Image: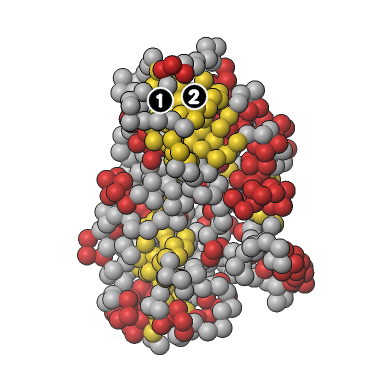
């Protein structure tokens, strides 16, 4: 050891996991189930990373829950789907390894760790134009979890995005949000709202937020509870500074916590699960398309620190892809405390009837109901004088009243504060709105008029909006004949800007089917594993369906842990050499 380094402590364990998102926690849990002693290091003050603020959906083709619903033969269809979607952009061996392991991972953790899900039977895959796409069943929703079961760790669980909660701390699922929109005319929806609010108000007397956890918070909480039961330590505010290499093998880490430098021996290796680099302005500039995204809804700790550690240890980045990110179109607004709200426009507004997206020329440029990932790709593809960064979502007052618009909730009675802040643009006429958003008035008027014509018969000959089951699943089923198309006709008119924002990144460290990081020669680096957005995307940067990121992260976390546990020769760093 160099004389300037004085380690205050030396710890020993079997496996060290860097990162506390779903991938890292799955790796830790799976290793513990395999009999290993495990330590999780998280450099942020809270646990969960981007997973905790996500939908928590996990994409697992051919899972046992969909088979229980009568869907058989999904493995073959999923292989057809990924083959057509990914093509030459990703390593076939990697996505096939995912298809092999994902259903096993799910069944294993459900049986041995009480990780419970329900299948979204009406959640179609995103690319219905590709053979093998499913109409539902592959995306899985985590069941609600009572945060009080975590004890003191409930305070260490990362919060969801504030704008995705009601009353500053009440979580609801997507299905519940849809149902609550009918509370004024549906007694069952009204009763649901009353029960949720009553519980939340009672809990606020004791807790900072509601303890009924859903979405990504529920997923992370269930993983954390399982780790608690197995006495697996999760250390927060632990900054890993170096991976230790011993005789060509990754054998531990050096880290700083509470101002103390420590060396941790990892007899079976280290798993990198830091969440990629969506929150790093520098790495976004190096890897993402121009104009480079300035904001992200990802966790602030996802800045690529673990990628840098892996590179320093001999791992290599995969090739640049089409755009190296998984995208959300997001609107941006300053919060009262001066912080920035980044609100992802996922499915609650873009697919609803009575909304169009226009570019800088005042023209539509895509089917507004496509997946968030493909919508942003269309924004970048537009280019030229009609650039769609930002794009403008154009609606009328009746739309906002019924569906809301991003940060603006349905039935918001007064929109003046949003207009005054500049977040929401308005005009008494389409021409006036066009001037407000800086697009040609005649072009926007023609676009809206043309679209209103489409609303009469429910057909969109330009972009075919509402013609796939994916589009329709996010529309308004009460609107006929097309649940995604409606007129923009009742003044005043409104528009909000949306920008490309990376939820995650798809360029990462190259790995093999065992989740082992590879060096420049394609040789596995002994003791070094990688999963989640730290790993080069097994899907080549494509986004197959809801939960594809978490499904991939958890599957390769599970694979990494099982491979580490199966290694016959454990290693140890002698204290003399420390």
Task: Give x and y (percent) for residue 458.
Answer: 51, 67
| Quarter the C terminus occupies | top left
Residue 167 falls in which quadrant of the image?
A: bottom right
> What percent of the width, then of the height, locates residue 317?
33, 33
Residue 515 at least partly seen: no
Give the residue drawn at x 40%, y 25%: 244
Check disc 1: other Cα within 10 Å, few if <14, some if 14-19, many if 20+.
many
Q: Are marks 2 and 1 in contact (CB under 8 Å)?
A: yes
Q: How many marks?
A: 2
Which residue reaches farthest top? 569
Quarter the N terminus occupies: top left
With respect to residue 371, does 304 lie above or below? above
Residue at figure coordinates x 47%, y 60% from the top left:
344
The residue that label 2 is drawn on is 265
Q: Earlier in the sequence, mark 2 or mark 1?
A: 1
Name the residue carrying label 1. Answer: 244
Residue 514: x %, y % from top left: 49, 23
Task: State the colouring used for the structure image.
Answer: secondary structure
Image coordinates of residue 232 in percent, x first then y, are: 63, 34
- Nearest the camera: 35 or 264? 264
Q: Is residue 145 above or below residue 113?
A: below
Q: Can you tell which quarter of the image residue 512 is in?
A: top left
Residue 169 visible in the picture = yes
Find numbered disc 2 in the image and state the secondary structure of the residue it sits on.
strand
């Amino acid at each position: 050891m160099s004389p300037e380094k004085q380690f205050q402590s030396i710890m020993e364990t079997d496996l060290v996991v860097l990162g506390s998102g779903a991938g890292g926690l799955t790796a830790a849990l799976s290793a513990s189930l395999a009999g290993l002693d495990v330590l999780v290091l998280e450099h942020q003050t809270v646990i969960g990373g981007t997973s905790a603020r996500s939908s928590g959906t996990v994409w697992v083709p051919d899972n046992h829950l969909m088979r229980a619903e009568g869907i058989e033969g999904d493995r073959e269809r999923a292989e057809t789907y990924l083959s057509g979607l990914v093509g030459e952009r990703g390593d076939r061996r990697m996505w096939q390894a995912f298809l092999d392991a994902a259903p096993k991972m799910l069944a294993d953790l459900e049986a041995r760790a009480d990780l419970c899900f329900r299948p979204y039977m009406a959640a179609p895959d995103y690319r219905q134009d590709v053979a093998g796409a499913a109409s539902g069943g592959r995306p899985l929703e985590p069941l609600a979890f009572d945060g009080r079961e975590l004890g003191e760790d409930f305070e260490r669980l990362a919060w969801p995005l504030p704008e995705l909660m009601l009353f500053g701390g009440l979580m609801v699922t997507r299905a519940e949000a849809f149902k609550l929109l009918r509370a004024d005319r549906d007694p069952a929806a009204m009763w649901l709202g009353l029960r949720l609010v009553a519980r939340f108000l009672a809990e606020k007397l004791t807790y900072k937020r509601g303890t009924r956890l859903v979405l990504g918070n529920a997923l992370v909480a269930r993983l954390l509870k399982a780790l608690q039961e197995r006495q697996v330590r999760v250390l927060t505010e632990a900054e890993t500074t170096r991976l230790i290499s011993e005789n060509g093998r990754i054998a531990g880490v050096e880290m700083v916590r509470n101002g103390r430098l420590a060396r941790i021996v990892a007899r079976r290796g280290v798993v990198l699960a830091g969440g990629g680099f969506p929150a790093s302005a520098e790495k976004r500039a190096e890897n993402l398309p121009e104009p480079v995204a300035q904001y992200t809804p990802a966790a602030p700790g996802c800045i690529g620190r673990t990628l840098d550690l892996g590179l320093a240890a001999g791992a290599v980045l995969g090739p640049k892809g089409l755009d190296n990110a998984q995208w959300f179109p997001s609107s941006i607004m300053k919060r009262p405390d001066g912080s920035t709200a980044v609100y992802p426009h996922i499915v609650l507004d873009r697919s609803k009837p009575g909304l169009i997206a226009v570019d800088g020329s005042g023209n539509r440029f895509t089917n507004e109901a496509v997946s968030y990932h493909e919508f942003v790709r269309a924004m970048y593809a537009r280019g030229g004088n009609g650039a769609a960064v930002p794009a403008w979502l154009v609606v009328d007052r009746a739309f906002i009243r019924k569906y809301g618009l991003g940060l603006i909730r349905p039935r918001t009675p007064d929109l003046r504060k949003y207009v005054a802040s500049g977040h929401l643009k308005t005009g008494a006429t389409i021409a006036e709105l066009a001037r407000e958003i800086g697009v040609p008035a005649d072009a926007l008027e023609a676009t809206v008029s043309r679209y209103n014509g489409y609303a009469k018969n429910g057909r969109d000959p330009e972009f075919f909006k509402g013609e796939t089951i994916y589009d329709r699943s996010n529309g308004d089923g009460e609107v006929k004949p097309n649940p995604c198309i409606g007129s923009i006709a009742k003044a005043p008119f409104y528009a909000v800007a949306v920008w490309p924002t990376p939820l995650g990144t798809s360029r990462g460290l190259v790995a093999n089917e065992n989740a082992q990081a590879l060096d420049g020669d394609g040789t596995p680096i002994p003791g070094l594993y990688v999963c989640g957005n730290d790993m080069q995307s097994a899907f080549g940067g494509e986004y197959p369906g809801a939960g594809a990121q978490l499904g991939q992260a958890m599957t390769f976390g599970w694979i990494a842990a099982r491979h580490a546990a199966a290694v016959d020769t454990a290693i140890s760093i002698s204290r003399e050499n420390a």
